[in-house]
Amino acid sequence: MTSRKASSSSSSSSSKKGDDKYTIILPTYNESDNLPIIIYLIDSELEKNFIDYEVVIVEDNSPDGTLQVAQQLQKIYGEEKIKILPRPGKMGLGSAYMDGIKKATGNWIILMDADLSHHPKFIPQFIERQKKLKCEIVTGTRYQSGGGVYGWNFYRKLTSRVANYIATVFLTPGVSDLTGSFRLYRKDVLEKLISVNKSKGYVFQMEMMVRANQFNYKIGEVPITFVDRIYGVSNLDSGEIVGYLKGVMTLFFDI
């Protein structure tokens, strides 16, 4: 199968806006159903906005054939657009990002979920906000006007709101959505934040924003709509909630 991009890459590269390149890191585990859709959406949204990009798929040995799906997508879109990093198993979100950065050739890194919770249509808005504010980080927020959550029941929405409120009161991070995972980072800033991040699981994203505020990085926000995954299973449980509350208190006394 020939690359779909082979015939157009040379003609389109000269029309890209500016010199910035964006690397999208997608950690995957059992995302064989979602991966083709999210890659299609990324390509569609970024190509029509003339954004120079690549995707690094960090694949943690999924038993559902995600790696094989990624390899087929690489044949379709081309190796210059789709890079694959197979790993022996689930090794944590922070290590997935750090390993992904090693394969990144972009000077900006976009972190998002592969489960269709985050729509790539917001990426051009992230880039526009970054350029306007000249900030090092842009984060998606569900809790500003224009943002929202779809597919969650009342309990899940309430839990998220309360968790975010508790963290905001104790940690004063300067952003409205601490636990979101749809973000744009300058590459060197992301590397530094991950290097000092001590948390895992649900608390990881929260600490990234708290540390960014600690180091006085400028952060912009873009309202986004978060959609609960269509395929697969969400992983929030009581253990994650307890871990989150412990994480808030640990950061409160540590920073």
Image: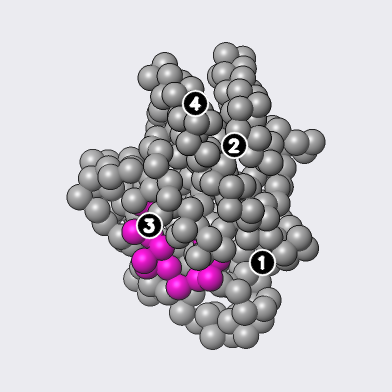
- Alpha carbon distance from label 3 to label 4: 26 Å
Residue type at numbered disc 3:
Met
Residue type at numbered disc 2:
Leu
Q: Where, by quadrant of the figure, is residue 150 drawn?
A: top right
Tags 1 and 3 in contact by the CB under 8 Å rule?
Answer: no
Q: Residue at the top extreme?
A: 155
Foreground: disc 3 or disc 4: 4
Mark 2 / mark 1, whichever is N-terminal = 1
Kindly identify which numbered label has been placed on residue 80.
none
- Alpha carbon distance from label 2 to label 1: 30 Å
Kindly identify which numbered label has been placed on residue 178.
2
Query: Is residue 71 rendered magenta in the image?
Result: no
Q: Where, by quadrant of the figure, is residue 48 drawn?
A: bottom right
**Which percent across, then down, holds residue 49?**
68, 67
Residue 11 visible in this rendered orientation of the protein? yes
Mark 3 / mark 4, whichever is N-terminal = 3
- Alpha carbon distance from label 3 to label 2: 20 Å
Query: Is residue 106 rendered magenta in the image?
Result: yes
Q: Which residues are magenta?
A: 96-109
| Label 3 sits on residue | 98
Say which quadrant the N terminus sits in. bottom left
Mark 3 / mark 2, whichever is N-terminal = 3
| Label 4 sits on residue | 249
Tags 2 and 4 in contact by the CB under 8 Å rule?
Answer: no
| Label 1 sits on residue | 48
